[in-house]
Image: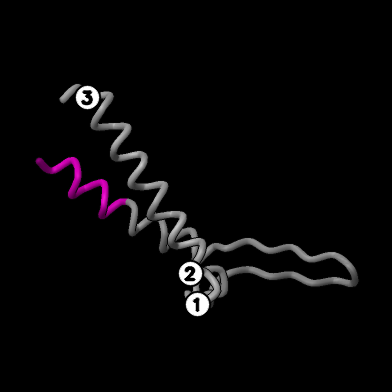
Amino acid sequence: MQPIGKFLIFAGALLILFGLLFSLSSKLPFGRLPGDIIIRKGNFTFYFPLATSILLSIILTVIMYFLNKR
């Protein structure tokens, strides 16, 4: 199989996985983890998902490590 074909299959699988995660996001604690920064002042709200970003970075790093190991 050509490298572009493998890439497209991998990208499609990732899109399906992310779609499932977003559809289940109401049941998962992502986006409301301790360490996420929320500042509310009057009618202004600033939200920065620091802990969520770090957790997703670690998960993606582990996945990429195992995919590139072969």
Say which amino acid is labelled 2.
Answer: Leu
Q: Residues within 10 Å of mark 3 (few under 14, many from 20)?
A: few
Residue bearing mark 1: 27
Nearest the viewer among 48 and 32 is: 32
Q: Is residue 19 left or right of residue 44?
A: left
Q: Label 2 vs label 3: CA separation?
A: 32 Å
Q: Residues within 10 Å of mark 1 (few under 14, many from 20)?
A: few
In the rendered view, would you say 9 is above or below 59?
A: above
In the rendered view, would you say 46 is above or below 60?
A: below
Say which amino acid is labelled 1.
Answer: Lys
Residue at (69% x, 70% y) in the render: 38
Residue 61: image tag: none
**Callout 3: SS:** helix
Where residue 59 sits, quadrant-wise, is bottom left
Residue bearing mark 3: 3
Say which amino acid is labelled 3.
Answer: Pro
Q: Residue furthest right?
A: 42
In the rendered structure, does residue 36 fall within the stretch colored magenta?
no
Q: Main secondary structure of the magenta part?
A: helix
Q: Label 1 vs label 3: CA separation?
A: 36 Å
The percent position of residue 27, horizontal first and vertical second, equals: 50, 77
In the rendered structure, does residue 67 fall within the stretch colored magenta?
yes
Which residues are the magenta region?
61-70
Q: Label 2 vs label 1: CA separation?
A: 6 Å
**Callout 2: SS:** loop
Q: Is residue 46 left or right of residue 62?
A: right
* Quadrant in the picture for the N terminus: top left
Nearest the viewer among 54 and 67 is: 67
